[in-house]
Image (cartoon, helix red, strand yellow):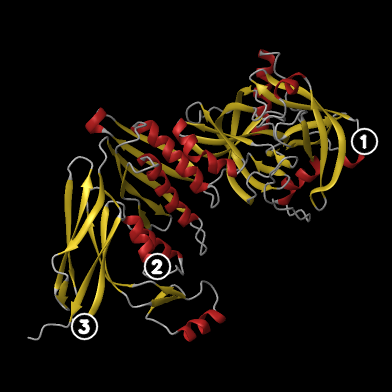
Amino acid sequence: MRHILTTVTLACLCAASPALATPAPARPPALLDHRTLKPGAVLQGDTVFSRAGLEPFTATVLAVMEDFLAPNEDLVLVKLGGPAVDKYGVVNGMSGSPVYLDGKLVGAVSYRFGTMPREPIAGVTPAESMMALLQHREKNPRKLTQAGPRLEGYGDAVPIETPLVCGGCSDETIAAFGPRLRELGFTPVRGSGGATGTRFPVFPGGPIAASFVDGDVSISALGTVTYVDGDRILAFGHQFEGMGDAEVMMGSAEVFGTIPSLANAHKVGRAGAVIGVWTEDRLVGIGGTLAQRARSVPFTMKLDRSEVLEAKRDLKFNVVDDTGLGAVMAQQAFHGALTNGTGHEDLGTIHLSGAVTLQDGRRVPLDDTFSSVPARTPTVSTALHVGEILESLWRNPFERVRMKQVDFVVKQDVEPHLGMMVRSGVDKVRIHAGETLRAHVEVRTHREGLKRLSVEIPTDPWMEPGVYSVLFADGDEATTFDRDAGLVPYPQSLDEVVNILTHRRRGDHLYVFLADRVKGARVAGQPMPELPPSMLAILNEGMEGPPAKKLARRALKVMSVDAGMMILGDAETTITVLAPRVR
């Protein structure tokens, strides 16, 4: 029924505007065996470069490169032509554009060759290879080739890059997360607002989106439809992210125009309503259906700048429930919403509260404070913090995590609340075992000058006399000491992952460690007393997993102080512990 409505809608649009091409026929085209192609054969292609609709181009066959992509996976080498191609070349977002010979589908334009080539040379993924994507879920006996690593370098065939349209994202968001997204094969570009909710027509040669984020902020990869058969759709002609069995939101899309560039010509557009799900992401393309919907995780963000602007704002968006890309897209969406909602100040402080709630009811808190630090704004630090927690949950090796919802409350202060450690000390450098040690550290604040933070550390009466260290650390340094001292075991279950995330070190706390200088070891993630070298060698010989690692020192006591500001730095003071007093 959806296919019929789509065809009717497109037919109406074509009647109103003769610039639009004829809609896809009721029956999909027959396939042509690419192995019968001869050099010089001229294929006819369609794609959308602007709101004018489908524009034709030609693809002259240069060669059929056998086993080029993988064993039994060929690539047809072609030279593109036509007025639009002469103007733009091989365009990012063109992936999936169908090419035909005598009305039969040959395949999809999907690869480019070299950097800034002098001619528009492209690769076409054969249609019969892509067809296996639709048949896979129907228990087709053909084994599908999983996507491999992306190729790089001059002269290599690389998948045509996919514009990642970021609606509601700022320039700061693109600058902060663009490098990581480019590593994944995307070209991040700004889009207009969040997802529109408009259902745009779907037809071969027309735009289509793989939507990672949908709502007040939207992030969607823009490509081209290759083939439509009822509710089943093929697109791109190359791997998306190589997920294999996928579950990514399929969005309708609109192309506004194409930006010409020798190095990076790309389509500009926006995602529309979510209309289905992409279920296959493999070497030869992506495939999906209009008949289903993908799971997603609802995010709610409450922005509060009431003390400054007397304004509060709630934002909602859905993030794809994907173990590979979910965290990357979530932190980009979070940063986009954050900068647009709280302002773009490089200075200031963000107080974050909220939690990740799993389907079984377990919660991981997100509470922390982030202020301006060298080379990192508080908005970037907050987004990275959120992304790291989500990635730890999604990518845990023990079981598939299903998130029920993610809720944030963000409060912004335009003043930086930051303290740098400058000196530390104790009230006595010599104490008796069993006495309480009083330690302090002075921090230089942004506005208040020097401020002293103090803590009392009880010692145990059975401590051996000797030299000990009092270590003062910020959240990052405390985490490093935890790891080196064996205080954080390697998790053995999802419960332990949740526990570690729940009790992680915070940036707005001061941590004080009382540590001895007895060498120890961490075996299978657990701290142990000092072991002789012969025992360490025996343990490492037949051990599975991380080897036994010698520890620099052992933590006897750990105290924390809520500093009320973000703390940076570390310091150390040495004390001598004497035998207990005789009473």
- Label 3's element? loop
**Residue at label 2?**
484
Q: Is residue 398 above or below residue 51?
A: below
Mark number for residue 462? Answer: 3
Looking at the image, is mark 1 or mark 3 earlier in the sequence? 1
Q: Position of residue 312 (x, y in %)?
A: 29, 32
Looking at the image, is mark 2 or mark 1 earlier in the sequence? 1
- Label 2's element? helix
In this image, 555 relative to 58: left or right?
A: left
Q: Is residue 167 above or below residue 392?
A: above
Type of amino acid at the residue the image marks with label 3: Trp
Q: Is residue 312 above or below residue 460?
A: above
Q: Is residue 146 visible?
A: yes
Closer to us: 246 or 4: 246
Closer to us: 215 or 126: 126
Q: Residues within 10 Å of mark 1 (few under 14, many from 20)?
A: few
- Label 1's element? loop
Q: Which quadrant is the C terminus positioned in?
A: bottom left
Mark number for residue 38? Answer: 1
**Residue shown at 43% from the left, 55% from the top:** 359
In this image, 82 relative to 215: left or right?
A: right
- Quarter of the image for residue 139 reads bottom right
- Quarter of the image for residue 112 reads top right
Type of amino acid at the residue the image marks with label 1: Lys
Q: Nearer the viewer's eye, disc 1 or disc 3?
A: 3
**Residue shown at 54% from the left, 27% from the top:** 198
Closer to us: 217 or 469: 469
- Quarter of the image for residue 264 reads top right
Type of amino acid at the residue the image marks with label 2: Asp
Tell me the CA gap for discs 2 and 1.
64 Å
Find out whether the residues at labels 3 and 2 contact each other: C-beta distance under 8 Å.
no
Tell me the CA gap for discs 1 and 3.
87 Å
